[in-house]
Image (cartoon, rainbow, N blue to C red):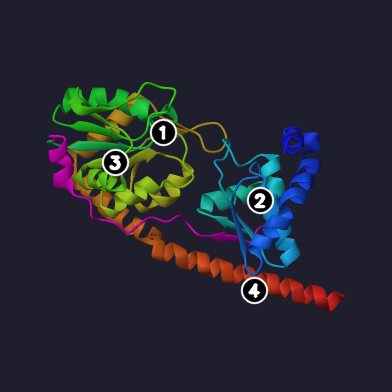
């Protein structure tokens, strides 16, 4: 594997690295996957396992489909990644935005839009959450890693301005702090902010039930499951005006999206004042907040697991049918 890693790290030797990796692991993949109807790889090229899976699919005569994990301009879109994607007989995209991006990079599909799945849960206990931390008044909830790219720092700055006009509001931040940073946990409200660490699924759902709105102004999202989870509770959400969130939320009036696109691709600038104004808009206009929440509830219905699984099953059947047609055509030409 040392030789493989050295080859993969040098673009001019990557083809050799792939051949070596397949020689090491394709036989194991074939043995493990024998008897399957479809081989489905989730991820990118740098894990390398996708190349062994592709080799196994060729040997076994079954369709090989890939569900890329792509953040345009950030990861999953290198030439090395596209070299793997080109080997698939089908590509699963979670949004039309992702499909369009992959097409613009030269991939021809076929594409299957499958979405992403959430549990159909509305069992969070709002009273339990509020009583556990002695919370009263409106709650702005942040769920996610406490890092600048998730919008955590920007949100805290914006909320300090919100408090000048709405001192009754509280900001609850729930999520892990990166290991190299000081822990951001304080189980008591301080300056209007409650800092919680990584919580259980039930803790998360209690927080969603209790909050007035969800605000996660992340710099990038491939899908944004947390917005859909909030939607199951009919909670209004605030996010950046990212193309993927425009597709899923903005066009349906299911979220308050802020910021302005700049540069190429998936970049949206957002300043403290605009975010502060968005939070105050929902705090001061309960009717708007309620309507956004109702719309988010309707949108999220399409992404509960039972519906997503149906889309995957349809895509698998299509992939198998297309592979069968291809094999029949091949046999007729020989």
In percent of width and height, residue 37 lies at: 62, 69
* Residue 17 in magenta stretch: no
Q: Nearer the viewer, mark 2 or mark 1?
A: 2
Which of marks 4 and 3 precedes in the sequence?
Answer: 3
**Residue 112 part of the magenta segment:** yes
The 10 Å Cα crowd at callout 2, few under 14, some 14 to 19, many 20 or more, is many
Q: Are marks 3 and 2 in contact (CB under 8 Å)?
A: no
Depth check, mark 3 against mark 4: the one in front is 4
Find disc 3 in the rendering and name its residue.
214
| Distance in Å between CA atoms under marks 4 and 1 | 41 Å
Q: Position of residue 234 (x, y in %)?
A: 25, 52
Vertical position of residue 82 compared to residue 121: above or below: above
Q: What residue is rendered at 19% in x and 44% in y? A: 210
Asked if the residues shown at circle 2 and circle 4 are in contact, with their CB atoms under 8 angstroms apart, the answer is no
- Name the mark on residue 297: none
Labels 3 & 1 near each other (Cβ < 8 A): no
Which residue has dot 2 on it? 50
| Along the viewing direction, whichever of 140 and 104 lies nearer the viewer | 140
Spot occupied by residue 220 in the image (x, y as percentages of width and height): 47, 37
Circle 4 — which element? helix
Q: Which residue is mark 1?
A: 150
Mark pair 2, 4: CA separation: 22 Å
Q: State yes or no: discs 4 and 1 in contact (Cβ < 8 Å).
A: no
Magenta region: 106-135
Q: Which mark is residue 321?
A: 4
Residue 316 in sight here: yes
Mark 3 secondary-structure assignment: strand
- Which image quarter is the N terminus in? top right
- Look at the numbered disc 2 and give the secondary structure of its residue: helix
Q: How many residues crowd mark 4 within 10 Å: few (<14), some (14–19), many (20+)?
A: few
State which tag comes first along the sequence, 3 or 1. Answer: 1
Q: Nearer the viewer, residue 289 or 309?
A: 309
């Amino acid at each position: 594997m040392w030789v493989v890693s050295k080859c993969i790290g040098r673009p001019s030797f990557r083809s050799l690295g792939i051949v070596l990796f397949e020689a090491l692991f394709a036989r194991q993949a074939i043995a493990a996957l024998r008897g399957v109807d479809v081989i489905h790889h989730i991820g990118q090229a740098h894990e390398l396992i996708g190349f062994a899976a592709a080799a196994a699919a060729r040997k076994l005569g079954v369709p090989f489909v890939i569900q890329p994990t792509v953040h345009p301009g950030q990861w999953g879109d290198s030439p090395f990644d596209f070299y793997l994607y080109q080997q698939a007989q089908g590509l699963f995209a979670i949004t039309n935005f992702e499909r369009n991006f992959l097409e613009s990079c030269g991939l021809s599909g076929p594409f299957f839009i499958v979405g992403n799945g959430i549990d159909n849960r509305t069992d969070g206990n709002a009273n339990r959450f509020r009583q556990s931390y002695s919370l009263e008044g409106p709650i702005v909830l942040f769920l996610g890693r406490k890092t600048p790219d998730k919008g955590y720092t920007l949100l805290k700055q914006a909320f300090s301005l919100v408090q000048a006009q709405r001192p009754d509001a509280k900001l609850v931040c729930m999520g892990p702090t990166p290991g190299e940073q000081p822990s951001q946990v304080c189980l008591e409200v301080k300056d209007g902010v409650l800092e919680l660490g990584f919580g259980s699924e039930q803790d998360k759902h209690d927080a969603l039930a209790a909050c007035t709105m969800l605000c996660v102004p992340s710099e990038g999202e491939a899908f944004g499951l947390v917005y859909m989870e909030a939607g199951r509770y009919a909670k209004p959400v605030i996010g950046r005006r990212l193309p993927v969130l425009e597709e899923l939320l903005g066009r349906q009036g299911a979220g308050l999206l802020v910021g302005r696109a700049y540069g190429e691709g998936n970049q949206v600038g957002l300043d403290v004042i605009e975010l502060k104004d968005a939070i105050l808009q929902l705090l001061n206009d309960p009717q708007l907040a309620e309507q956004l929440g109702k719309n988010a509830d309707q949108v999220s219905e399409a992404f509960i697991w039972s519906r997503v699984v149906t889309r995957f099953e349809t895509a698998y059947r299509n992939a198998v049918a297309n592979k069968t047609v291809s094999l029949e055509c091949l046999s007729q030409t020989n």
